[in-house]
Image (cartoon, rainbow, N blue to C red):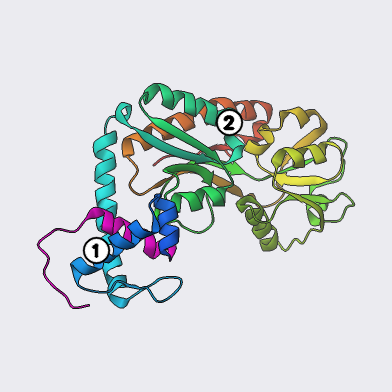
């Protein structure tokens, strides 16, 4: 395609669709994400190429592959589009009361009281805003943020960095042992596997499970298990019935109050380790809205989870705590 001069300026829609197509790898997937027809997406992409006078996409390949010029063009527009989106967001949400749309995802660990209280607070502070709340696993929330299906999310922080997202650490949630009430074996024997009580674990596709398994490997501990589950309440119920023991966190333990009389909580023997809960957001999210949500989450976690846990289990003081925002 021969370069030529075009008096008309670049269309922002062309650039946004090109960016999505480059990420998704197909015109059809781009159409599904944007709600446009395939023909409309194709028209905009063709218009962009004709405007520039270069081929940005190798349309003959599936999935669609960027040409060398397309790769260079994408690298140059990524930061520009981010700056434009951030400017638009700040302009429309400088006053949180004027915000119009907000999509928040959260892990189910907080859906009993923290998220409902957050929803009520945001509704009062942002009366004209349309909210969407979505509950999922941490890796699902992170993926939805990266695909721009959510604006913000409350998740367990994965070990790897997420440079494409903003992160505000919220909570240090240490790993602890939960045993049946009548268990009298020593903690080192239980964790070391020299007992008949089986280890009940979280499903391996969860970030929390990978963090626990990584720590056990570092300690040279290999535990046989008979049961794996992605639901904390089910694990707590199994422990309460005497079916085994598990490794969990104070936050998750606090969500299972109905089983507290049938189980016992202990610190992890040896070197302690913890997961971190964070508020994540897309790079163009408004700082004013982030500040509002961050502040409310911290107040709710302190009042509903941390203080009651410290009162019931004093050895958690200094371990189960909010993370300093600085």
Outermost residue on the right side: it is 196
Q: Nearer the viewer, residue 221 or 117?
A: 117
In the rendered image, residue 286, in percent from the top left (x then y), is placed at: 32, 40
Q: Which residues are magenta?
A: 1-25
Q: Nearer the viewer, mark 2 or mark 1?
A: 1
Q: Nearer the viewer, residue 324 or 146?
A: 146
Q: CA distance from mark 2 to mark 1?
A: 56 Å
Determine whether 232 is above or below 199 in the image.
above
In the rendered image, residue 134, in percent from the top left (x then y), is placed at: 53, 39
SS at mark 2 in the image: helix
Q: In the picture, which quadrant includes the N terminus?
A: bottom left
In the rendered image, residue 235, in percent from the top left (x then y), is placed at: 76, 42
Tell me what residue is drawn at x 28 percent, y 46 percent: 86
Left/right of residue 62 with respect to residue 236 in the rendered view: left
Question: Toward which corner of the image does residue 116 lie, by quadrant?
Answer: top right
Determine whether 193 is above or below 102 in the image.
below
Provide the residue designation for mark 2. 306
In the rendered image, residue 13, in percent from the top left (x then y), is placed at: 27, 54
**Viewer can see residue 191:** yes
Outermost residue on the front side: it is 39
Q: Is residue 61 magenta?
A: no
Provide the residue designation for mark 1. 47
Outermost residue on the top side: it is 124
SS at mark 1 in the image: helix
């Amino acid at each position: 395609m021969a370069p030529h001069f075009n008096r008309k300026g670049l269309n922002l829609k062309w650039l946004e669709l090109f960016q999505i197509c480059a990420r998704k790898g197909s015109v059809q997937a781009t159409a599904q994400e944007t709600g446009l027809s395939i023909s409309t997406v194709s028209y905009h992409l063709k218009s962009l190429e004709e405007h520039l006078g270069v081929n940005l996409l190798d349309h003959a390949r599936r999935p669609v592959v960027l040409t060398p010029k397309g790769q260079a063009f994408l690298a140059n527009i990524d930061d520009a589009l981010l700056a434009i989106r951030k400017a638009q967001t700040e302009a429309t949400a400088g006053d949180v009361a004027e915000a119009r749309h907000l999509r928040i995802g959260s892990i189910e660990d907080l859906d009993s009281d923290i998220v409902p209280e957050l929803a009520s607070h945001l509704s009062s502070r942002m009366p004209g805003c349309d909210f969407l709340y979505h509950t999922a696993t941490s890796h699902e929330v992170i993926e939805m943020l990266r695909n721009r299906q959510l604006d913000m999310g409350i998740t367990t922080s994965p070990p790897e960095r997420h440079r494409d997202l903003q992160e505000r650490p919220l909570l240090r949630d240490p790993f602890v042992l939960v045993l049946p009430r009548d268990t009298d074996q020593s903690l080192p024997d239980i964790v070391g596997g020299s007992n008949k009580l089986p280890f009940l674990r979280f499903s391996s596709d969860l970030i929390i499970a990978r963090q626990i398994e990584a720590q056990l490997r570092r300690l040279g501990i290999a535990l046989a298990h008979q049961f794996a589950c992605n639901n904390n309440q089910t694990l707590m119920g199994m422990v309460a019935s005497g079916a085994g023991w598990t490794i969990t966190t104070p936050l998750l333990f606090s969500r299972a109050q109905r089983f507290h009389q049938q189980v016992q909580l202990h610190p992890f023997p040896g070197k302690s380790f913890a997961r971190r809960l964070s508020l994540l957001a897309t790079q163009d999210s408004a700082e004013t809205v982030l500040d509002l949500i961050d502040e409310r989450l911290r107040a709710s976690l302190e009042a509903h989870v941390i203080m009651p846990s410290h009162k019931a289990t004093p050895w958690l003081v200094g371990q189960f705590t909010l993370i300093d925002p600085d």
